[in-house]
Amino acid sequence: MTSKLRNIALFAATAAAIALGAVRSAAAMAFEDISGKWCGSVSSYTFTPGKLIVVLYNGNQRFEYKIDDYQYEEGSITVNWVRNGEKLFTKFSEFSGDDRFMAQQQNNAGPRREFKRCS
């Protein structure tokens, strides 16, 4: 009987963890969800309240862009930024429940790219 009870408890804990991850993507986002450094396959992004720092791995080129604002929605964050006087936006979504993964969504400013929190 103890083994059966343990299995039920383990199943309940696993189901709760999965549900918590699903709820995470449906909840309103905040700056803490995107702040800091993220590593992708060709570049890294560092988000501060007023600046986006992009480092391209090829040639270790560094670019800094002014961020006008962040728009927080359920499951996504839109970053409004300026490059060479041109106002652009980039939307990030697909945030993982453990805050370790997100994806830049494709638009005119760039392709879809996956990022994970840098170690």
Image (cartoon, rainbow, N blue to C red):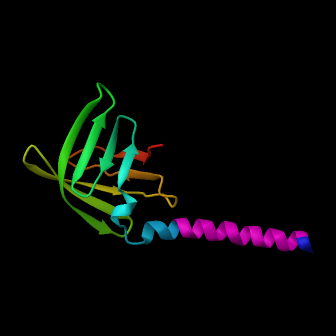
Can residue 13 be found in the magenta stretch?
Answer: yes
Residue that protrudes farthest toward the left in the picture = 85
Residue 78's place in the image compared with 74, above or below, is above
Residue that protrudes farthest toward the top in the picture = 59
Query: Image quadrant for the N terminus?
Result: bottom right
The stretch in magenta equals: 3-21
Instruction: Report the predominant secondary structure element of the magenta stretch.
Output: helix
Across and down, in percent, residue 20 comes to: 55, 69
What residue do we see at 37% from left, 70% from top? 74
What residue do we see at 39% from left, 40% from top? 40
Across and down, in percent, residue 27 comes to: 42, 72
Across and down, in percent, residue 80 comes to: 19, 57
Asked whether, in this view, residue 116 is left or right of residue 10, the answer is left
Q: Quadrant of residue 92?
A: bottom left
What residue do we see at 61% from left, 66% from top? 17
Residue that protrudes farthest toward the right in the picture = 1
Asked whether, in this view, residue 40 is left or right of residue 108, the answer is right
What residue do we see at 29% from left, 43% from top? 111
Q: Quadrant of residue 61?
A: top left
Across and down, in percent, residue 43 comes to: 34, 37
Can residue 76 be found in the magenta stretch?
Answer: no
Q: Nearer the viewer, residue 65 or 71?
A: 65
Asked whether, in this view, residue 19 is left or right of residue 117, the answer is right
Q: Nearer the viewer, residue 19 or 44?
A: 44
Count up the numbered dots: 0
